[in-house]
Image (spheres, grey):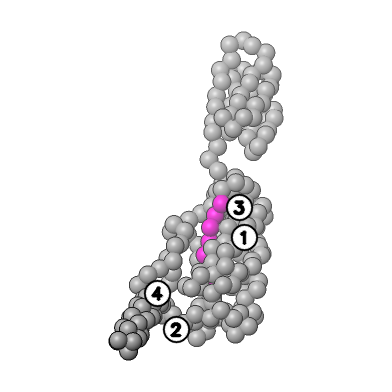
Amino acid sequence: MNRYVLALLMATFMFLTGCGLEASLEDLAGLSSPKLPPGIELPKRPVAGVVTDPEKSDFLNTEILVGSHGVADGETILQIVVRLMNSDNTVVAGYVPEYSITNGTGVIKGACTASDNFGVSICSLRSTDSGIKTVRLENTADFHPEKDVVFDAPVKETTTIGSSGGDVQEVSNPRGWRMTATVGTQYDKVVTSKNGYQLRVGPVGSVTE
């Protein structure tokens, strides 16, 4: 009876272990995939295994993957993916990449997650300035790949207020800021500006852009 129970336990253990191994092989074969930001797909490349020791990693197949453009409002987060991969097609798990900005201004750097079993780390950044920024990986041994990301200027609200003979024009925005100016100044003269908006006042009204 004891031998029967032991045999049953061993068979159950082998079955469960086999399932776990099969699931891992499916992951490596790309039959399952990590969660990625919208617009980003991993390149079709075979994965030879998973490495957890960065000292044994050369990172020579590491890539920076970018999806959509960011919005240069200083608030909206742009997520990019770093795929940490070695020259032998093994991926590096449990590693946090570090990056710098070698081109462009106004970038607010965010954190990167530790890479998962697919070698995938997700990094976040914001920017107050529009344009092209260049991201460079720094702690990937002697290999430092770079990638350009683009931040678009935010679409700004436009409000026009007509004048009915008053001395002061006032314009406000749902975000809470307010500007005032006196009617009668030259239309193409910038009277005041705030938060990237300009208020111009002329005889027929005021305009923000």
Relative vertical location of residue 27 with respect to residue 201 in this rendering, above or below: below
The residue identified by callout 2 is 48
Question: Which numbered mark, 2 or 4, is in the foreground of this view?
Answer: 4
Q: Quadrant of residue 1?
A: bottom left
Amino acid type, label 2: Ala
The residue located at (64%, 38%) in the rendering is: 196
Checking the image for residue 27, the label placed there is 4
The residue identified by callout 1 is 111
Amino acid type, label 4: Asp
The residue identified by callout 3 is 126
The residue located at (50%, 62%) in the rendering is: 66
Residue lying at the far top in this picture: please name it. Answer: 165
Classed neighbour count for the residue bearing mark 4: other residues with Cα under 10 Å, few (<14), some (14–19), many (≥20): some
**Mark 2 or mark 4, which has the lower sequence index?**
4
Tell me where residue 172 appears, x and y as whole percent: 60, 26
Question: Which numbered mark, 4 or 1, is in the foreground of this view?
Answer: 4
Q: Which of 189/67 is in front?
A: 67
- From the viewer's perspective, is 190 left or right of 147? right
Labelled pair 3, 1 in contact (Cβ < 8 Å): no
- Distance of label 3 from label 1 (alpha carbons): 11 Å
Amino acid type, label 3: Arg
